[in-house]
Amino acid sequence: MANKLFVGNLPFDATNEQLQQAFSQAGAVSEVFIPVDRESNRPRGFAFVTMSSDAEAAKAIEMFNGKDFGGRALVVNEARPKEDRPRNGGYGGGYGGGM
């Protein structure tokens, strides 16, 4: 298991400090990252929390997955690497050129 966690269904007003404080109940938190939308500069509703060890990450999943945080049930699991996806020129979703 990796020590980087994906935290989904996060309230849009959640802060790095709130996540740091909450997840520190499971162990030492190395990093908290809340991505923001490029256009609106608003949080996207999820975060990545890096714990200092795999054991602490497993404990955090056990403690927080499905638990209420700011009125929403969190989804906490091991973060997976971002998959390569084709950008605007890849397959699917485009306009078909008919004859």
Image: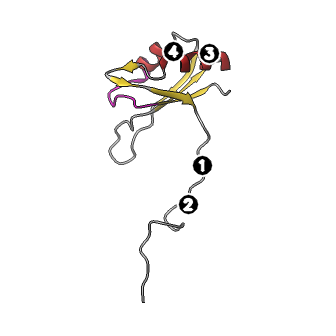
Rounded to the nearest angstrom, the CA distance separating label 4 from label 2 is 36 Å
The label on residue 39 is none
Q: Earlier in the sequence, mark 1 or mark 4?
A: 4
Q: Main secondary structure of the magenta part?
A: loop
For disc 1, the neighbor class at 10 Å (few under 14, some 14 to 19, many from 20) is: few
Residue 17, horizontal then vertical, whole percent: 42, 18
Give the distance between the C-alpha atoms of the residues marked 2 and 3, in whole angstroms.
35 Å
Which residue is denoted by mark 2 in the rendering? Answer: 86
For mark 4, what is the residue? 63
Could you say whether the residue bearing mark 3 is in a helix, strand or loop?
helix
Query: Which numbered disc, 2 or 3, marks the residue that appears first in the sequence?
Result: 3
Disc 1 to disc 3, C-alpha distance = 26 Å
Q: Are marks 1 and 3 in contact (CB under 8 Å)?
A: no
Distance between the Cα atoms at labels 1 and 2? 10 Å
In this view, the residue in front, 41 or 69, is 69
Q: Circle 3 sits on which residue?
A: 56
Identify the magenta region: 8-17
Q: At 42% from the left edge and 19% from the top edge, which residue is drawn?
A: 67
Mark before the other along the chain sequence, 4 or 2: 4
- Residue 15 is a magenta residue: yes
Res 86 → quadrant:
bottom right
Which residue is found at the position 40% from the left and 31% from the top? 9
Q: Which residue is mark 1?
A: 83
Q: Is residue 25 left or right of residue 98?
A: right
In this rendering, the label closer to the viewer, 4 or 3: 4
Above or below, comparing residue 38 to residue 48 in the picture: below
- In percent of width and height, residue 71 lies at 31, 22
